Amino acid sequence: MNTLFDKIWDKHVVQIVDDGPTQLYIDRLYCHEVTSPQAFAGMRQRGLKCFRPKQIFCMPDHNTPTHDQDKPVEDPVSRKQLETLDKNCEDFGLTEFKMNTKDNGIIHVVGPEKGLSLPGMTIVCGDSHTSTHGAVGAVAFGIGTSEVEMVMASQCILQQKPKSMRIRVEGKLAPGVTAKDVALYLMSQLTTSGATGYFVEYGGQVIRDMSMEGRLTLCNLSIEMGARGGFVAPDETTFAYLKGREYAPKGADWDKAVAYWRMLKSGDDAVFDKELVFDAKDIAPRITYGTNPGMGIAIDGTVPTLDEIDETEQASFKKALNYMGFEPGEKLLGHPIDYVFLGACTNGRIEDFRAFASVVKGHHKADGVTAWLVPGSWAVDKQIREEGLDKILEAAGFQIRQPGCSACLAMNDDKIPAGKYSVSTSNRNFEGRQGPGSRTILASPLVAAAAAITGKITDPRTL
């Protein structure tokens, strides 16, 4: 019996090249301003039009400022990127969710939110965190700019079929433990290359119990284990989330779609190339101490000592600790921090803002902490205000910024200064990721909130 990955993949095969890649049909291409300009330039050069423009959706997000979006963009590089995307979408007749409109945000937040990402689809974007869309039961993965051009021109892509892996997380998560902690735990167990060459299907009780927001966070971080992508088989949680969304099927088409989606699962006797099982009781709130997302510990744990690190990795381990200003064997609880970032395609959804607000309610932001709270879309911003979370956050001394990728990757104005510590809900923590010399500690919205009101790394379970 085939795995779900096999079923979706095989249904999209156009042709198999002998001793070569597979030509795969793509249902949805997402484009943003950073990885699309060269693809559009290549199309112009060859005098080509987009083969199926209605299946391509574009969005500025990486370079968008998160304040004063109604004013001209100050940074010349960002301004050029944003203007170029506008012109390209206009010239090629593509749908663009423009900056400062109700449809804008981060593409990996807006796609599922609008019902553009649906079960059984193949979805690509010139961005590694395209794996996020796997949460709806799609095969979604990041591609390079030349491949973006290939999809624009033909709605197909040449790909080697990855191997399949199933990761099951069984049991029940303890209070204070989130999908982000599950992802950080898996990365620490598998390392950042442990899933290289695989497409991961997540299963088990913990995943079945997860909300769609949680699954989106988990799938977002699949790429950080080296996986080609990660996904969750669609179920009642998926259908409830998608029903009534703008681009989701309606009426009789909805019923027909759900009947098909219910069949999208791996058979009981499906054979995976690799299977791993983890226990929820082993997962606590987590933080990272190093310069890749796999260098993480339980929040009340200690940084590993040198004798716990493989000899071949000791040099990079020492380099990472030196950059971060931490010592082997050190506990990080109580370590002072300077910045807190809530947002990104990892944790910029409504559930993340609810979680953050639940911790800071009745408290106040610590003096000396700069906090950037950035919704993943204008729809999230609207929901924050409808639920009154903005009042709770403002009473605690926080301001909500305008949607965008923000401090995830320092391509806009939101940069962490050199040497400063940032507790961040984003997805990457390599040297300079949030700004030259910045030091990033990856964490969940609950851990970020606890740090924001105490000014130091704090276990949210103690508040």
Image (tube, rainbow, N blue to C red):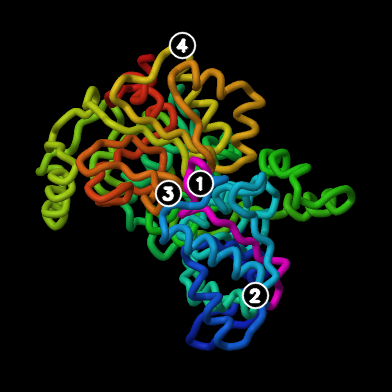
Q: Which of pointers 3 and 2 indicates the residue nearer the eye?
A: 2
| Chain-order first, disc 3 or disc 2 | 2
Q: Which of pointers 4 and 1 indicates the residue nearer the eye?
A: 1
Which stretch did the figure color magenta? 51-68
SS majority, magenta: loop
Residue 59 falls within the magenta-colored stretch:
yes
Residue at numbered disc 3: 276
Relative image position of residue 253 (x, y in whole percent): 85, 54
Front residue of 232/423: it is: 423
Residue at numbered disc 2: 155
The residue drawn where x is 30% and y is 20% is 367
Q: Quadrant of the C terminus?
A: top left
Q: Amino acid at mark 4?
A: Gly
| Chain-order first, disc 4 or disc 2 | 2
The residue drawn where x is 34% and y is 25% is 451
Residue at numbered disc 1: 404
Residue 280, compared with residue 184, is above or below; it is above
Q: Amino acid at mark 2?
A: Gln
Contact between marks 4 and 2 (CB within 8 A): the answer is no
- The crowding category of the residue bearing disc 1, from other C-alpha atoms within 10 Å (few below 14, some 14 to 19, many at least 20), is many
Q: Amino acid at mark 1?
A: Gly
Disc 4, SS:
loop
- Tell me: 273 left or right of 243: left
Residue at numbered disc 4: 362
| Chain-order first, disc 2 or disc 1 | 2
Q: Which of pointers 4 and 2 indicates the residue nearer the eye?
A: 4
Q: Which of pointers 4 and 3 indicates the residue nearer the eye?
A: 4
Relative image position of residue 239 (x, y in whole percent): 72, 43
The residue drawn where x is 43% and y is 55% is 223
